[in-house]
Amino acid sequence: MPHLFSPIKIKDIEFKNRLVVSPMCEYSAEDGFANNWHLVHLGSRAVGGAALIITEATAVSPEGRISYGDLGIYKDEHIEKLKEITDFIHANGSVAGMQLAHAGRKASHELPWKGNAQIASDHPNGWKSFAPSAIPFVPEEEAPVELDKAGIEKIKADFKDAAARALAAGFKVIELHGAHGYLIHEFLSPLSNHRTDEYGGSFENRIRFLLEIIETVKEVWPAQHPLFVRISASDWTEGGWTADDSSALAKVLLNKGIDLVDCSSGGNVLARIPLKPGYQVEFAEKVKKETGMLTGAVGLITEPKQADEIIQTGQADLVIMAREFLRDPHFPLRAAFELGHEVKWPVQYERAKWSK
C-alpha cells in the first residue's frame, strides 16, 4: 500500500488516507451563510476521496471576515446549511473539518475578482479592522484599531462560541487559523505586534493570545475530537517569525493538547518567497522531527508520487492540498490509480474507473 493511502487515527477520528483538502476561500457567502456553492465545492471533494475536508477560513465574527463574501459561523442560523454539508461529507466517507479564523488587519477587503483592495471602514461593504497594534498591512491602507483588553476578551469568546456552533453543525475537526497574516499570526509575529503589555514583546507574551484561544475553545470542543493549528512557519523576513519559533511554539502546543500543526508560511508582510514544488514541506519536517508533533505539509504539492514521498520519508503526517484540489476534485482517485492502489469509488462513478 502506498504510504499516502495508509489510514491514520487522531484522537477518536480515523482518516482513511493522508490527503486533506486545504481551506480555500470561495468568497461566495452572504452575511456568512453557506449556500449550494459550498455544498458542491466541499461535497465534490468528499466524492473524490479526500480523507479530511476543511472549510475555507470561517469567520468567528462579522468584523473577522476577510471580505463580505466570507463564510461565517457567528450566528446560530449559520448552522443549518453547514449541517447539510457535513452530513453529505460524512455520508461519502470523508471527515468534515472547519477552520476558525479572524482576519485581523487584513479584514474588510473587496472580492479578489473585483480587485481585492481594502474597503474603507465607512463604506457600506466595509468595517473597521482590529489588530494587536495599529499597523496597517501596507502603508496606504487604513490602519487597524489596536485591540484593548475588552476587545481581546470578546474575540476569545467569539472563538469559543464558533467552536460550539461548529460542533452543532457536525464538524469533527477544528483548525485554528494562525497563519497568513491574519489576527493570531499578527500577535505571534514581532513585525505586526508592537505591544508592551502581556500580549507583546517576548515570545511567551506573543503566543499568549493563541494559547488563551485554545483554552477557551477546549471548554466546548470534545476532548475526543482533533484540534489543529495552522501556522505560518516563517515570515520570510528578517526580524520576523522564524522556523525555530515555530518549533518552539509546537512544543508548547503539544503540551496544550493540540493534535497537529499545519505548516504554511508567509502572508504577514510583503516578502520574497522562493517558490518551488513542495517549498514549505521543510517546515513541517522540522517541526515534526524537533517536537514529535504531528504535522501537515502544504505548498505546491501537485503529484501523487511527490505526496506519497512526503509521508513515506516521515516529513509530515498529512498532505494538505489546495490548488490541485481546485483543478482536480478527484485527485485521491487519480493518485490511487497512479500509485497502483485499489480504492473504493462512489458506485455512481464506478463505470468510469481506470484500469490497467
Image: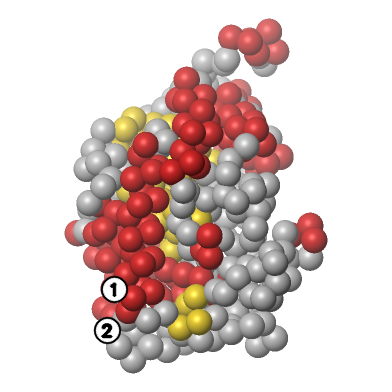
Residue kind at label 1, given as amino acid type: Arg
Where residue 8 is drawn, which disc sits there? none
Camera-side residue of 292 and 9? 9
Query: In the drawing, does residue 5 fall left or right of residue 294?
Result: right
- Tell me residue 130's x, y (percent): 50, 75
Camera-side residue of 130 and 295? 130
Describe the element under mark 1 as helix, strand or loop: helix
Residue kind at label 2, given as amino acid type: Glu
- Circle 1 Cα neighbour tier, 10 Å, few/some/many (<14 / 14–19 / ≥20): some
Q: If the image is split into quadrants, where does the N terminus sit?
A: top left
- Tell me residue 78's x, y (percent): 50, 42
**Residue at 59% in and 84% down:** 143
Q: Mark 2–mark 1 contact, CB under 8 Å?
A: yes
Q: Is residue 105 above or below residue 238?
A: above
**Residue at 53% in and 60% down:** 62
Q: Is residue 85 above or below residue 145?
A: above
Q: Which residue is label 1 attached to?
A: 208
Q: Which residue is label 2 attached to?
A: 198
**Residue 197 falls in which quadrant of the image?**
bottom left
Q: Is residue 323 above or below residue 9?
A: below
Whether residue 293 can be seen here: no
Q: Residue furthest bottom?
A: 196
